[in-house]
């Protein structure tokens, strides 16, 4: 994902995921790399 999308693109995609899955219970690391999404999945 990080090779294909910029950091800004990933941030927008994760913000959309925040709306539909605010607790990040559904596949937290399946789409987004752990290094990028770890701060959201810990919340």
Image: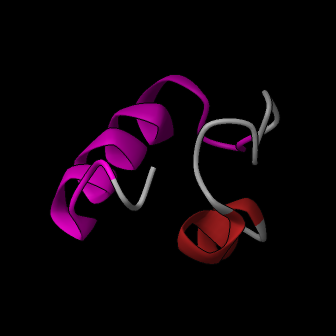
Give the residue at x 47% y 34%.
Answer: 17
Residue 37 among those drawn in magenta:
no
**Residue 2, image x, y percentages:** 41, 61
Viewed as shown, does residue 21 lie left or right of 4?
right
- Magenta region, residue range: 4-24
Give the residue at x 71% y 42%.
Answer: 24
Q: Compared with residue 17, is residue 43 higher up or lower down, i.e. above or below?
A: below
Snapshot quadrant of residue 6: bottom left
Q: Compared with residue 40, is residue 4 higher up or lower down, i.e. above or below?
A: above
Which color scheme does this rendered protein use?
secondary structure
Q: Nearer the viewer, residue 31 or 22?
A: 31
Viewport quadrant of the C terminus? bottom right
**Residue 15, image x, y percentages:** 34, 46
Q: Compared with residue 19, is residue 5 higher up or lower down, i.e. above or below?
A: below
Q: Compared with residue 37, is residue 35 higher up or lower down, i.e. above or below?
A: below
Residue 8 among those drawn in magenta:
yes
**Residue 10, image x, y percentages:** 32, 53
Viewed as shown, does residue 1 lie left or right of 12?
right
Give the residue at x 26% y 68%.
Answer: 7
Q: Nearer the viewer, residue 32 or 2?
A: 2
* Total number of numbered discs in the rendering: 0
């Amino acid at each position: 994902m990080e090779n294909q999308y910029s950091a800004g693109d990933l941030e927008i995609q994760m913000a959309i995921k925040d709306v539909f899955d605010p607790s990040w219970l559904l596949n937290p690391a399946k789409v987004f790399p752990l290094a990028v999404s770890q701060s959201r999945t810990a919340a």
